[in-house]
Image: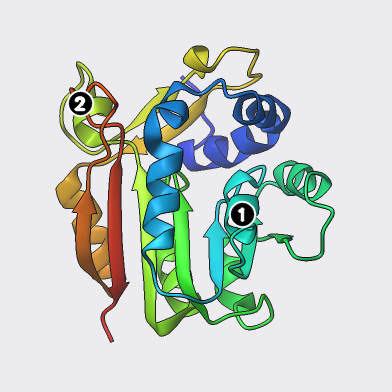
C-alpha cells in the first residue's frame, strides 16, 4: 500500500503518463471515445450558450482544438505541464490557447486567462475526492449566466463488482493498449454525490444525460449540465 496520498498520486500520474495518454487519444485506442463519448460532449457544447469556453483538464488538447475549429473562442488549461506542451505542439495556431494551471491558479488567474467564460467543460477531468476547490474555481471563472458541462464515468457502469459507495479506485489503463508507466487513483462517486458537490459549490443542475453505446445496452458516461445559482 503506497504511503503517498491518492490525490498526490493522481496529479503525478498525469505527468508520468503524459506521452502514453497522448498516444492513446490520438491513435483512437480508447473504446468509449469511439463509441460515443466524444460525440456526446461535442453535442452538449454545441447546445450551450454562444461565447468563450474554457476546457478544464484539457489533457493533450483534442477537445479544445475541436471546439476552436467551430469558431468558438476556447482556452485549454491543465495542471500537467507535459500535456500542455503536447497540446501546444499539436496546435501551432494562435487561435488555440493552452495554459498550465492548477485549480487554485485558475481561481486566481481567471480574468488574466480571458474570463469570464460562458461555458466551462470538464471532460473526464474531475477525478479527485475533493471537488470543492475545482468547482469553486470554475464557478468564479464563469459569467453569471455561465454553464458548466461535466462528462464523467457513469457510476452504474464503473461500479463493477464494487460497492456503490464513494471511494478511491485504481485505473491501470490496461484496456487502452500501450504501456502506461503509472496506474492512476481516481475517486468513484455516486450520482447523489455529484449533485451534492454541484449544489455545495453554488451550481444548479439543469439536466442529466446518459450517452448510450450504439447497442443501446449500457450507458457510456454521465453528462451533467449546470449553471451558476446566482
Provide the secondary structure element on which disc 2 rests: loop
Measured along the vertical axis of the image, is residue 34 above or below residue 42? Answer: above
Are there few (<14), some (14-19), or many (20+) residues within 10 Å of tag 2? few
Q: CA distance from mark 2 to mark 1?
A: 28 Å
Q: Position of residue 61 (x, y in %)?
A: 65, 47
Q: Nearer the viewer, mark 2 or mark 1?
A: 2
Note whether residue 44 is visible: yes
Measured along the vertical axis of the image, is residue 186 above or below residue 91? Answer: above
Q: Is residue 22 left or right of residue 134?
A: right
Which residue is disc 2 drawn over? 216
Which residue is found at the position 37% from the left and 45% from the top? Answer: 40
Which residue is found at the position 53% from the left and 37% from the top? Answer: 10
How many dots with numbers? 2
Which quarter shows the C terminus?
Answer: bottom left
Q: Position of residue 114 (x, y in %)?
A: 65, 79
Which residue is found at the position 60% from the left and 30% from the top? Answer: 25
As drawn, the residue found furthest toward the front would be: 70
Look at the numbered discs 2 and 1 and tell me whether their residues touch, using CB distance below 8 Å.
no
* The one of 158 and 94 positioned closer to us in this rendering: 94
Q: Earlier in the sequence, mark 2 or mark 1?
A: 1
Q: Where is residue 54, by image quadrant?
A: bottom right
Provide the secondary structure element on which disc 1 rests: helix
Which residue is found at the position 44% from the left and 64% from the top? Answer: 133
Note whether residue 130 is visible: no
Which residue is disc 1 drawn over? 64
Q: Position of residue 84 (x, y in %)?
A: 73, 49
Amino acid at each position: 500500500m503506497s504511503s503517498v496520498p491518492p490525490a498526490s498520486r493522481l496529479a503525478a500520474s498525469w505527468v508520468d503518463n503524459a506521452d502514453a495518454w497522448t498516444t492513446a487519444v490520438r491513435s483512437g485506442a480508447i473504446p468509449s471515445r469511439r463509441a460515443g463519448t466524444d460525440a456526446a460532449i461535442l453535442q452538449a457544447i454545441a447546445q450551450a450558450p454562444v461565447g468563450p469556453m474554457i476546457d478544464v483538464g484539457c489533457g493533450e488538447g483534442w477537445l479544445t482544438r475541436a471546439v476552436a475549429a467551430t469558431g468558438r473562442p476556447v482556452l485549454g488549461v491543465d495542471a500537467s505541464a507535459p500535456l500542455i506542451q503536447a497540446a501546444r505542439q499539436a496546435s501551432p495556431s494562435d487561435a488555440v490557447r493552452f495554459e498550465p494551471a492548477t485549480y487554485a491558479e485558475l481561481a486566481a488567474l481567471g480574468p488574466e486567462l480571458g474570463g469570464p467564460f460562458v461555458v466551462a467543460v470538464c471532460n473526464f477531468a474531475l477525478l479527485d475526492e475533493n471537488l470543492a476547490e475545482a468547482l469553486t474555481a470554475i464557478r468564479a471563472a464563469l459569467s453569471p449566466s455561465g454553464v458548466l458541462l461535466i462528462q464523467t464515468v457513469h457510476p452504474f457502469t464503473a461500479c463493477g463488482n464494487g460497492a456503490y459507495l464513494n471511494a478511491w479506485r485504481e485505473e491501470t489503463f490496461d484496456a487502452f493498449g500501450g504501456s502506461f508507466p503509472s496506474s492512476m487513483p481516481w475517486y468513484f462517486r455516486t450520482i447523489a454525490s455529484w449533485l451534492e458537490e454541484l449544489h455545495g459549490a453554488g451550481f444548479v443542475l439543469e439536466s442529466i444525460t446518459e450517452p448510450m453505446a450504439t447497442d443501446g445496452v449500457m450507458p457510456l458516461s454521465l453528462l451533467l449540465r449546470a449553471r451558476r445559482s446566482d
